[in-house]
Image (tube, helix red, strand yellow):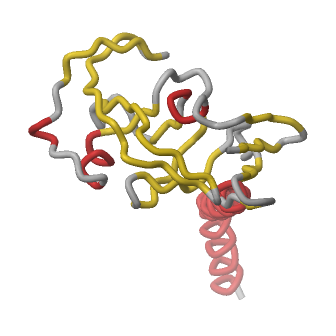
């Protein structure tokens, strides 16, 4: 009887010591699932009519989508505070720009301070039924920029864009 009681107490103590670890893992899994589900919805653009695309606001309050740049899919966030489209060196390489040919001579002021950038011209950027040609972009180092930003060099080539009711409507 004593052995059975001791065994039960040890099992309870062992399981109690593991609950915080198990609970953390379950919470992380739930957070990841919750965070990715809205992003998947936000990343999809909907074509309402020809030359018009709508992006839904993501959970962080940003408009994100999968754009095609020079024919390649690139996940990007619309940033009307950025003068130009901004890509990192890895993305530039995927889009056909040789890193060795990039001339990092431009001083660019970002939210994180001043940094050197290279100027390129993207042949085309597409999202949904919108297609824009000859878009100026800056290339920054991978350390300085982890994601692609679609700035005003793309947005100003649209006929109009409006943000209301958690949607961004772009019209060409």
Residue at screen point 53% across, 35% down: 154
Give how far across and how far down residue 113 sits, in percent.
Answer: 40, 11
Residue 107 location, quadrant: top left
Up/down of 169 relative to 26, above or below = above
Residue 120 location, quadrant: top left
Residue at screen point 57% across, 41% down: 77
Extreme-right residue of the structure = 165
Horizontal side of residue 18 vs 171, given as left or right:
left
Residue at screen point 50% across, 21% down: 83
Give how far across and how far down residue 170 sits, in percent.
Answer: 72, 43
Horizontal side of residue 112 vs 126, given as left or right:
left
Q: Where is the C terminus found, in terms of image quarters?
A: top right
Give how far across and how far down residue 115 sits, in percent.
Answer: 31, 16
Up/down of 156 relative to 19, above or below = above
Horizontal side of residue 93 vs 36, given as left or right:
left
Extreme-left residue of the structure = 100
Q: Which of 76 and 145 is in front in this view?
A: 76
Residue 18 visible (yes or no): yes
Q: Which of 53 and 110 is in front in this view?
A: 53
Residue 36 visible (yes or no): no
Horizontal side of residue 88 vs 170, given as left or right:
left
Up/down of 159 relative to 96, above or below = above
Up/down of 87 relative to 111, above or below = below
């Amino acid at each position: 009887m004593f052995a059975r009681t001791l065994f039960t107490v040890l099992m309870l103590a062992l399981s109690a010591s593991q609950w915080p670890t198990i609970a953390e893992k379950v919470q992380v899994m739930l957070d990841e699932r919750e965070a990715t589900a809205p992003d998947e919805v936000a990343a999809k653009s909907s074509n309402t009519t020809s030359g018009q695309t709508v992006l839904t606001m993501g959970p962080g309050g940003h408009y994100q989508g999968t754009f095609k740049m020079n024919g390649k899919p690139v996940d990007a966030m619309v940033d009307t505070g950025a003068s130009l489209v901004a890509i990192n060196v890895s993305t530039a390489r995927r889009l056909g720009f040789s890193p060795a040919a990039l001339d990092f001579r431009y001083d660019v002021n970002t939210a994180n301070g001043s940094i050197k950038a290279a100027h390129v011209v993207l042949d085309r950027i597409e999202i949904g039924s919108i297609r824009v040609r000859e878009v100026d972009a800056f290339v920054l180092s991978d350390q300085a920029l982890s994601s692609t930003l679609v700035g005003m060099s793309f947005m100003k080539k649209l006929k109009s864009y409006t943000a209301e009711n958690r949607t961004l409507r772009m019209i060409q």
